[in-house]
Image (cartoon, rainbow, N blue to C red):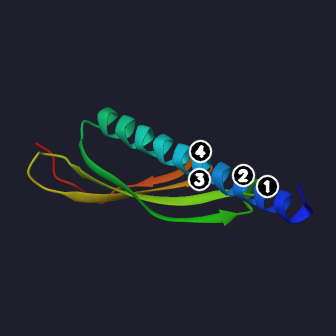
Amino acid sequence: MTLGELTLFLLLLAVGFQFWRIRSISERAYGHVEHYCNTHQLQLLSVARKKTRLSFKYAKIDWWSVFVFEFSGNGEDRYVGEMEMIGQKVLRTQLPPYRTN
């Protein structure tokens, strides 16, 4: 194995690890939004990742992600909320004013 092959192997390994890391962050975000909506008696309609970037907050490098989710308070109207995360830690969850039954 040459140095070039070893470098390529390590690069592919790092890319694969980051793919799985971002995937686990997305699953954690979905779980948090689902729990948040159940706690506040809201109907969760969808969750999507809006953006993801590397961040140096809290003295370590990790993924900073923003997720948007659609929910309903009364089953008829649709609203869009936003959640911000660093790694798997939720920084904030923001919802617009919404109508309930």
What kind of element bears circle 2? helix
Label 2 – label 4 distance at C-alpha: 21 Å
In this rendering, the answer to whether 1 lies above or below 55 is above
**Distance between the alpha carbons at the discs numbered 3 and 1:** 14 Å
Q: Position of residue 4 (x, y in %)?
A: 86, 65
Q: Quadrant where the C terminus lies?
A: top left
Count neighbours of disc 4 (C-alpha within 10 A) and say few if under 14, some if 14 to 19, many if 20 or more: many
The answer to which image quadrant residue 31 occupies is top left
Residue 36's mark?
none
SS for tag 1? helix
Give the class, few, some or many, for how many residues have Cα within 10 Å of label 3's Cα (few <14, many ≥20).
few
Select label 2 or label 4 by which is in front.
2
Question: Where is residue 82 drawn, in percent x and y?
Answer: 40, 58
Circles 3, 2 touching at the beta carbon (< 8 Å): no
**Residue denoted by label 3:** 19
Q: Earlier in the sequence, mark 2 or mark 4?
A: 2
Tag 4–tag 3 contact (CB < 8 Å): no
Circle 1: residue type: Leu
Which residue is found at the position 11% from the left and 45% from the top?
Answer: 75
The answer to whether marks 1 and 2 mark residues whose Cβ atoms lie closer than 8 Å is: yes
Say which residue appears at 72% left-offset and 54% top-offset: 14
Number of other residues with Cα within 10 Å of mark 1, as a class: few under 14, some 14 to 19, many 20 or more = few
Q: Which mark is residue 88?
A: 4
Kindly identify the amino acid type of the residue bearing the numbered disc 2: Leu
As drawn, the label of residue 13 is: 2
Q: Residue at x 33, y 33 (%)?
A: 39
